[in-house]
Image: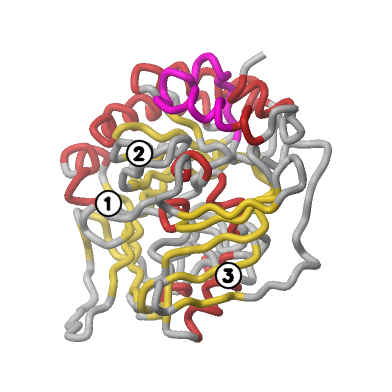
Amino acid sequence: IADSAEMIAFDRMPMDVKIDREAGTATVNAGMRYAELGRALEREGLSLPNTASLPHITAAGGTATATHGSGDKRQNLAGAVSGLEFVTAEGDLLRVERGDPDFAGMVVHIGALGVVTRVTFDVQPTYRVRQEVFLDLEWDVLYAQFDEIFRSGDSVSIFTDYGETVNELWVKTIVKDDDDWQPRSELFGGRAATVQVHPVMRFDGTVCTEQLGVPGAWIDRMPHFVEAALTDAGNEMQAEYMLDRRHAVDGIRALRELADLVEPYILAAEFRTVAADDLWMSSSYARETVCLHYATRADAGVPGTMLPVVEAALAPFAPRPHWGKLFVATADELEPRYPKMNDFRALADRLDPHGKFRNPYLIEKVFGA
């Protein structure tokens, strides 16, 4: 977690990608960004099962915090990790692989177990994707057809500012060999966009990956933003809460009731879905998940005023916050929402008995005072 007085960077280490075709894996430097990793895999005719919306995050950071993309059948980025190399608190090199004891507790480690130096990913054959955007979906349609909407593509996202309509529906679909796609003028009542659009309607859509149904390599369509775009909006804050999929509509309704409160801060909200996994500290541990995200202006009122009310509204649905974004819940509040949190604490105590890797964030959010 970057909220620390001390940082370790990997920029000066070799950014190589070691592919094992027989095992179906690729091992990379922990500091490699997904953009570079995706390009290296694409050159070899390979791909990752999923990517986040931003291609600028690193292999270690994205997986350690269970960062995700979207898709009913797609796990978050940590789900593709099959091996890790750590430098432990004692300076030893520790290599762990899927199937080893406690491996499920070590992937989403939120920086508490050691310094990850290498990450091994499952890889698969490359594929092509097309991306379509539809505008001004009615809220009642979203509520009534939530499942159908999020199954209308291989990766689906909703963007809104909680106004009169749902601003944008983004549908990413794998292009098959016998593809006979024809442009659609509407979907679920939303009209097809005819120019590139940005999740924040007033921003320039040219920083986003190509839309309008034009097929492209997975690494050029699965992220929302192009490699050259440093961030989606610039100086901003982000918060995100993961609920059991069955609470999706109720959770969205609860947040919509807070529209007046969040209006001074919000740039855009995004709704996505993620498949369940077995990783102890994952926000999708043992449950199909809906992800409710805010991108806001950089304003102290977000953590000070907005998020306490948002978290109180979502409390009946046992929200799990994104470990790499803002939230106000403490370890005591989060413990009941993570069935394996005490096991994770014990694992951290064993690997880092003197707490070398703990900082105020981890103490407040995971280990408790």
Q: Position of residue 179 (x, y in %)?
A: 20, 82
Q: Is residue 236 left or right of residue 274?
A: right
Look at discs 1 and 2 and give the one toward the viewer: 1
Q: Is residue 108 above or below residue 302?
A: below
| Among numbered discs 3 and 1, the one appearing first in the sequence | 3
* Camera sees residue 360: yes
Quadrant containing the N terminus is top right
At label 2, counting other C-alpha atoms closer than 10 Å, the crowd grade (few under 14, some 14-19, many 20 or more) is: few
Marks 2 & 3, CB-CB < 8 Å contact:
no
At label 1, counting other C-alpha atoms closer than 10 Å, the crowd grade (few under 14, some 14-19, many 20 or more) is: many
Q: Which mark is residue 72?
A: 1
Instruction: Considering the whole magenta stretch, tell me its main secondary structure.
Output: helix
Locate residue 278: give its quadrant.
top left
Report the front residue among 234 and 359: 359
Q: Which mark is residue 35?
A: 3
Quote the CA–CA distance across marks 3 and 1.
23 Å
Q: Position of residue 230 (x, y in %)?
A: 66, 62
What SS does tag 3 mark? Answer: helix
| Model colouring | secondary structure
Q: Is residue 273 above or below residue 227?
A: above
Q: Residue reaching furthest right?
A: 5
Type of amino acid under label 1: Asp
Report the front residue among 114 and 144: 114
Type of amino acid under label 2: Glu
What SS does tag 1 mark? Answer: loop
Q: Is residue 122 left or right of residue 65?
A: left
Q: Residue at x 58, y 55 (%)?
A: 95
Label 2, on which residue?
164
In the image, the segment drawn in magenta is: 326-347
Count of all numbered marks drawn on residues in the image: 3
